[in-house]
Amino acid sequence: MSEARFQLHVITDGKRQANDLHAIVERAVKGGADVIQLRYKSAPALDLYTLAQAISPTIQAAGAGLLINDRVDVALAVEAQGVHLAAKSLPISSARPLLQPHQLVGCSVHSVEEAIQAEQTGASYITYGHIFATNSKPGLPPRGVDALRQVVEAVNIPVLAIGGITKDNLEEVLAVGVAGIAVIGAVMADEDPERASRELRDVMDNSVHRPKKALPSARSLASQAQGVTDGGVSR
């Protein structure tokens, strides 16, 4: 898996029962999703941990990665590839020392200033949006591709775009040098998550554009994790 390729992150929508979620995740990674971000905002730690444990083998078997939204403790417990932080999560500067060097710490930002601050405090990558109009942000005007370009140019860490991205507008997003995209409904709500993922994956793989700064692949992170364990310094 090339380190320079665009990544597709699929974020769970928190609406699925365990069996349904597992089926969607299996089809999403089969279709080419690079990362599943497990997000259940109101779930107790034990429920989130149980879900992560249930879907992790399927994700790993596909060569994809698992990120845990918000919960650093769960990310550590299930040995996920990292954690994605939001505005009300732990500060990046507090979360980063708790994780292994190979584990990612991502966060959501909504301005150039927030993006720069995230990089300065230790974020591995950032997610910026929403780029286009989306049902998950009703009534809020999209920030647009020009604003996304400014964020990509302002930082030297990977930037994922999120919000209203489809196969029809994806090339416009890739052109600004993002590391990839994060989607929710485009895959989670589709009647065929495998096809939905593959259509997005095909656009990215056939694009003439390349990331300004790419994210490491799940296999690369897993290899680094194995090296840490073999070196006897695993937490």
Image (cartoon, rainbow, N blue to C red):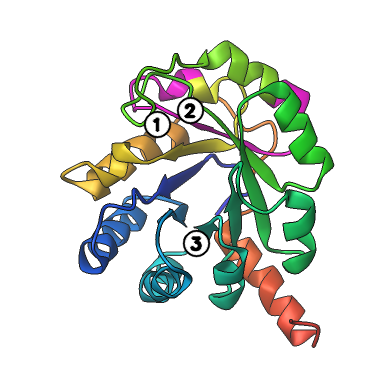
Question: Which label lies toward us, 1 or 3?
Answer: 3
Does the residue at mark 2 contact the one at mark 1 (Cβ under 8 Å)? yes
Q: Is residue 86 visible?
A: yes
Pinpoint residue 140: horizontal percent, then vertical percent.
43, 18
Q: CA distance from mark 2 to mark 1?
A: 6 Å
Q: Amino acid at mark 3?
A: Leu
Residue linked to disc 1? 203
Foreground of the two, 215 or 73: 73
**Measuring 43% from the left and 28% from the top, which residue is drawn there?**
163
- Range shown magenta: 152-172
Q: Secondary structure at mark 2?
A: loop
Dot label at residue 66: 3
Left-right relation of 207 to 153: left
Q: Amino acid at mark 2?
A: Ser
Q: CA distance from mark 2 to mark 3?
A: 25 Å
Is 94 above or below relative to 79? Answer: above
Is 170 above or below relative to 229? Answer: above
Return the disc, 1 or 3, that comes first in the chain's sequence. Answer: 3
Dot label at residue 207: 2
The part of the image, by quadrant, that contains residue 211 is top right
Is 70 above or below relative to 163? Answer: below
Q: Amino acid at mark 1?
A: Val
Dot label at residue 38: none
